[in-house]
Image: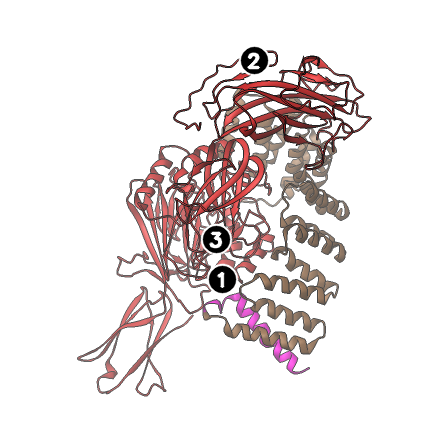
Amino acid sequence: MKFTSTSRKKVARFFQGLFLVCFPFVTHAQPVTLFGITNVWRFNQTENLDAVAWKNPAFDDSTWPSGAALLYSETNALVAPRNTPLTLGRTTYYFRTHFTFTNMGNDLFLTFSNKVDDGAVFFLNGAEVQRLRMSAAPASITYTNFATAAPSSGDATDWDVFSIPATNAISGDNVIAVEVHQVSASSSDIVFGSSLSVAAGSIIRGPYLQMGSSTNITVRWRSDVPMDSVVRFGTSSSNLNFSTTDVAVMTEHEITLRNLIPDTKYFYSVGNSINALAGGDTNHWFVTSPIPGTPKPTRLWVIGDAGTGGASQTAVRDAYYNFAGSRPTDLWLMLGDNAYNTGTDAEYQTAVFTMYKALLRQSVLWSTLGNHETAQSTAYTNTYPYFQLFTFPTSGEAGGIASGTEHYYSFDHANIHFICLDSMTANRATNGAMANWLRTDLASTTNFWTIAFWHHPPYTKGSHDSDTEIELKEMRENFLPILEDAGVDLVLSGHSHCYERSFFLNGHYGLSTTLTSNMIFNANSGRETNAAGPYTKWASGSQSHQGAVYVVAGSSGQATGGALNHPAMFISLSQLGSLVLDVNGDRLEAKFLRETGAIDDQFTIVKRDVEFSSIQPVANGVQLLATNVAASKTNIIQTSDTFLNWVSISTNVSSSNRFQFLDTQATNSALNFYRILRLP
Amino acid sequence: MPFLPHSLLAAIVLAWLFTPVTTFAHGDLRGEIDTITQQLAVQVDDVSLLLKRADLYRLHGAFGLALADCQIAQQAKPDFVFTHFVRGKIFSDAHLYEEARSAMDKFLAVQKENSEAHLARARVLVQLGDFENGAADYSAAIRFAKVVKPDFFVEQADVWRAVGKFETALLSLDEGIKKLGPIASLEIPAIELELDMRGYDKALARVDLLAAQSQRKEQWLFRRGEILEMAGRLSEAKMAYAKAAEAFVQLPLRFKQSESTKRIETQLAAANRRLETR
């Protein structure tokens, strides 16, 4: 019988007898205790039973003495509860007990929580199920074999826990037999006790997708009881004909699927070797990235400082879900402070894994470290829960150059190169490891777009001030020059709980008071609906210092205002919302999506070479219209009637992405050629 | 205000006098400090809260308040060794390195396997000029860290390099490379060390490792030429420079004209001129 979550009803009707524990019905995801640590066991501490079938259920152990656990010869008071003394002097001690199942499920797991000093072999109904600190199978274990080690703390002060599928358990009476071995002939203690619980394994977190590339993806989830890990997958939801397994028994599951086909939709399920516990339907799928460098329309969702876990976060999420409709989200970025207040596992459960359950199972999530992930600590360690929860590249697994750390990394998706930096705990010096890695990474990429993200914004006057806070100042001073030199297109940050979006900028590395007009390459909106049009960069020309947009998107969980008057910003809003990015070939469109569904800001960056969109003879000459003009850049129109000797007839610095020119000298010429040049 | 020994007060005042005043703060600390202060109004002697606030005060640069919290914590729970570590970090940030070492010594005498504390004391010892012990602390920090970072090895190598122990410095970086792979942030300083010791072939091998990871090769081809030229292998250097020049020619225009590529192109041209005369 397989229990569904809806049919499970907790039934606590079981009783414990001297040797009989009855467990009638497993009905709930929570583990149910079959017997406790003080369970009574029959034991034998006088014989070598190598030649005896003592493990078999039918063995008559009625002549063995009995006693409640812990059964022990131990002086360490921390080993508790001690109930039945044993006598030292044997290499191996034998223990047996019974329990009863009256109703079986086919997805049940038995969890043994043990106090063992030193090693042990466990049998269920005569079949070996587990070894603790004994030579690994298939080595045979006899009376004279010693344990391979003592407990890690020296004595049985800690629990040895393992789980097994309940497939060996039978409806009715079951027998557990355990042989406990000393680590040496001179061992000064012996301890044994075990409690047993049963649960229908279920998933309590995820599945969620990590570190996606064109060929690999990592699937993670958490189960309520330890079990092995299996991801079954295929290109049809009705035929998951591939699988990847990790036989290690655990509750934190992490499986990397390899050798996938690029740009391909896969359906999947997650579970254990017995059952799929989630997925195997049309809601659980992912799409592998295209081959790096290959343009493909790409949708990104960007949220910052989202993790309040309340109505505001929910409203921002739902606005995006409504906006996206059936359009899949190819990947999403979290800009840090993903779970308030200190980024604990429990806070992440509420603010991330429960909040975004639907998106997590379909779209690869990437994140950067915020100050609330570390509870404000600047210690550069991996001890924060964030690093246990997420899997990020350290060896260039998803493109880019290996960083050796999950604190900062890069990856490729389609024709976009993403760079994630750690503005909170990593060394922010220009000669630090992060900066040296960044230079190398940028000098390696050949991708068309470069998007960088980290938590502390280089420019903000929201709930934080980039003129007064050290992390913001150092990221601006030390990392923007590196990024702009390599032609970064878009920089995303959070931290300030507002939305701020810059002009098309270059070279602003000082305080806000040092911003000058020549650092603003394009002072327009960057909106295509506006006459000035989108921000324009060369497609084929140098990308270095050609302008970038800086966005603070830190209002995905709360909007807390601020002066909102940074002069580098085209727009500053104290409104809840998130950022939606659509990258399609040479176009990058960004929208600030309010929690109401309204779009309060948008801009576009296009990377195209300047060209004449029309050349029209008119009464007094030839009217030329140049488009894809990069604002603030010098453009020279030249003409020739031979195609060999070119003469400059106009030099133009436009404030928008287009300009007109009337060539009045062309009137009497039969044939004119024109070309337009852009200076760097 | 809890009692502070005169010597301690004097030290704090001296530290402030001689420490450059920073106008830059860490965001969000004030709110966190306020929150903990409210909690402490109820849980007056909660040592973990006191030490947490002390650490936040430290990050905020309020060293006197931070030390005061440590003092209360120590009075409330004299045997709690973490107080020494927090105090050590405060002294370190206040540039009182002898006091920092003393506090960290007390902590590490008990918590021998605390990687973060070994790392913190390593930095303090380097400031005190005790490079040997500083390097040993880096080793301990690396040994006890659950996940090592490139920075540990880079910092340790810098210590050894500062005292002229290039081979030992290289061993530090190679230990990192062994653990983390041939990552740029370790291989680049390793190349410099190899060159310090005239280990040209080894430097070239490292360059090749980096080139193999990179989609664009031009900077590494140029670096090969530089190293070969340093080694006096001029014909090979010419060939390497020629390959670098070829890579630059083939490089799409959009990757050219950055400061870094322009710098390499300029250096490449100069190298070619230089070799023509030799």
* Comes first in the chain, label 3 or label 2: 2
Side (left or right) of A207 relative to B165: left
Q: Is residue B13 visible?
A: no
Side (left or right) of B176 relative to A171: right
Task: Give the quarter of the figure containing the C terminus of chain A.
Answer: bottom left
Q: Residues within 10 Å of mark 2 (few under 14, many from 20)?
A: some
Q: Nearer the viewer, residue A279 or B222?
A: A279
Q: CA distance from mark 3 to mark 1?
A: 31 Å
Residue A576: image x %, image y %?
A: 35, 40
**Which amino acid type corresponds to the residue marked 3 in the rendered image?**
Leu
* Comes first in the chain, label 1 or label 2: 2
Residue A16's disc number: 2
Residue A260's disc number: 3
Residue A252's disc number: none
Residues rendered magenta in the picture:
B254-278
Q: Is residue A664 visible?
A: yes
Q: CA distance from mark 1 to mark 2?
A: 71 Å
Side (left or right) of A84 relative to A264: right
Residue A258: image x %, image y %?
A: 52, 51
Whether B173 is drawn above or below B214: the answer is above
**Which amino acid type corresponds to the residue marked 2 in the rendered image?**
Gln
Residue drawn at point x = 63 percent, y = 18 percent: A97
Shown colour of chain A? red
Q: Which residue does the numbered mark 1 point to in the structure image?
A: A486
Label 1's element? loop
**Which amino acid type corresponds to the residue marked 1 in the rendered image?**
Ala
Which is in the foreground here, disc 3 or disc 2?
2
Q: Are marks 3 and 2 on the same chain?
A: yes
Query: Which chain does the residue under circle 2 lie in?
Result: A
Q: Residues within 10 Å of mark 1 (few under 14, many from 20)?
A: many
Task: Give the quarter of the figure containing the N terminus of chain A.
Answer: top left
Shown colour of chain B? brown
